[in-house]
Amino acid sequence: FMRTEEYILEKLKEFKLDISKIGSAKREVALLPTILGDSEELLDLTPGAIGNVMGIIACTDERVVLLDKGILFRHNQKDIPLNKINSVTFEKGIMFAKVTIMDSSSSIFIEVVNDRVDKLVSTIKNAISKFKEINNSDTCDDLIAQLEKLSELKVKGILTDEEFNQAKAKILC
């Protein structure tokens, strides 16, 4: 069955998000039924800034979706499969938190309001854990590639020794 607008609105209530208070993100929320897969579960959603553009960050049981409506009939969408995410971190500022999602090829920076960041990050981390439990079919080659990428990030100074060791421990578990 296809995800409906009613499904999305019900989920927003569950997430304690008032659609009338999320401003321009209403346009992105309206796109979700066409973007989500038939059996894909929406686990969390929050408005935020992706680069300098306002949009939404949605976490599902399969991926993290960064979505902004753009101009006219275009929209910009970035999907990050849960199995490709290496780490999710955040730093709180005065009003906004900077969330960093690292996958095997890049770091994505998102800004969200402080009162939404804890739930968003914990939802993404829990979704990754559950996804890995269900799809625990990492091959030796995948592990080696992940470790090589981590090592590259450490050499480039993107990861500290502590972050590198934590991420390495997660991969080797």
Image: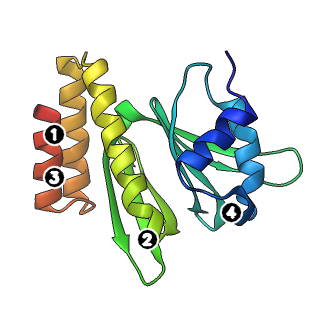
- Asked if residue 26 lies left or right of residue 131, the reply is right
Q: Position of residue 167 (x, y in %)?
A: 18, 46
Residue shown at 25% from the left, 24% from the top: 133
Could you tell me which secondary element the residue under label 1 belongs to?
Answer: helix
Circles 1, 3 touching at the beta carbon (< 8 Å): no
Instruction: Give the residue at mark 2.
Output: 97
> Which mark is on residue 164?
3
Which numbered disc, 3 or 4, marks the residue that appears first in the sequence? 4
Residue shown at 24% from the left, 48% from the top: 152
Observer able to see residue 69: no
Instruction: Give the residue at mark 4.
Output: 22
Mark 2 or 3, closer to the camera: 2
Which numbered disc, 1 or 3, marks the residue that appears first in the sequence? 3
- Asked if residue 113 lies left or right of residue 27, the reply is left
> Which mark is on residue 170?
1
Query: For the residue carrying disc 3, how many other residues have a C-alpha within 10 Å: few (<14), some (14-19), or many (20+)?
Result: some
When asked about the image quadrant of residue 82, the answer is top left
Could you tell me which secondary element the residue under label 2 belongs to?
Answer: strand
Which of 53/96 is in front?
96
Which of 45/57 is in front?
45
Residue type of the residue flagged with mark 4: Ile
Residue type of the residue flagged with mark 1: Lys
Mark 1 or 2, closer to the camera: 2
Quadrant occupied by the C terminus:
top left
Which of 16/57 is in front?
16
Mark 2 or 4, closer to the camera: 4
Q: Outermost residue, bottom direction?
A: 94
Quadrant occupied by the N terminus:
top right
Circles 3, 4 touching at the beta carbon (< 8 Å): no
